[in-house]
Image: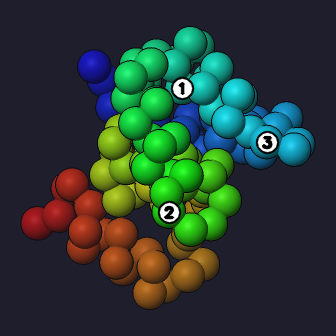
Amino acid sequence: MRPVPLATLFTAFLIVSLCGFGGGIVWARRITVEQQQWINEEEFADIVSLCQFMPGPNIVGIAVCVGAKLRGVSGAFAAVRRSHSHYPRMSAFVRRAGPNRK
């Protein structure tokens, strides 16, 4: 499977956040499992179970988990916020921790 572009990952979860008023889990599943086929049904169920256990909004946890699974640390950041370049410390962290580090 080809790497998912970070902009595509960001756009997918932007749609979830805009359309998922009152709960975006259904939209997240529809996009990640049915439309894009980034993960399968079992993986999505595991991610949702983990996110319900963790504190915070489930949809944010789902976005981070799916982003991390697809593209690592960069994908996790992209799923919740595409452009982190105006946060110098975060950008430096992503560059050091990303899969293309040297």
Residue at the spot of label 3: 23
Of label 2 and label 1, which has the lower sequence position?
1
In this view, the mark in front (3 or 2): 2
Question: For this view, does 59 lie left or right of residue 97?
Answer: right
Residue at the spot of label 1: 32
Q: Which residue: 49% across, 57% down?
A: 53
- Assess whether mark 1 and mark 2 are in contact (beta carbons under 8 angstroms): no
Of label 3 and label 2, which has the lower sequence position?
3
In this view, the mark in front (2 or 1): 2
Residue 102: quarter of image:
bottom left
Question: For this view, does 69 lie left or right of residue 17?
Answer: left
Q: Is residue 78 visible?
A: no
* Amino acid carrying mark 2 in the image: Met
For the residues labelled 2 and 1, the Cα–Cα distance comes to: 20 Å
Image mark for residue 54: 2
Dot 3 falls on a residue whose secondary structure is loop
For the residues labelled 1 and 3, the Cα–Cα distance comes to: 15 Å
* Amino acid carrying mark 1 in the image: Thr
In the rendered image, residue 66, in percent from the top left (x then y), is placed at 45, 41
Residue 24: quarter of image:
top right
Q: Is residue 45 above or below residue 97?
A: above
Looking at the rendered structure, the number of numbered marks drawn on it comes to: 3
Q: Which residue: 44% across, 19% down?
A: 41
Q: Is residue 86 above or below residue 70?
A: below
Q: Which residue: 55% across, 82% down?
A: 87
Question: For this view, does 6 lie left or right of residue 43?
Answer: right
Q: Would you call the spot at circle 1 few (<14 residues within 10 Å), some (14-19), or many (20 or more)?
A: many
Q: Identify which residue, 67 or 102, lies in the foreground.
A: 67
Q: Identify which residue, 64 or 46, lies in the foreground.
A: 46
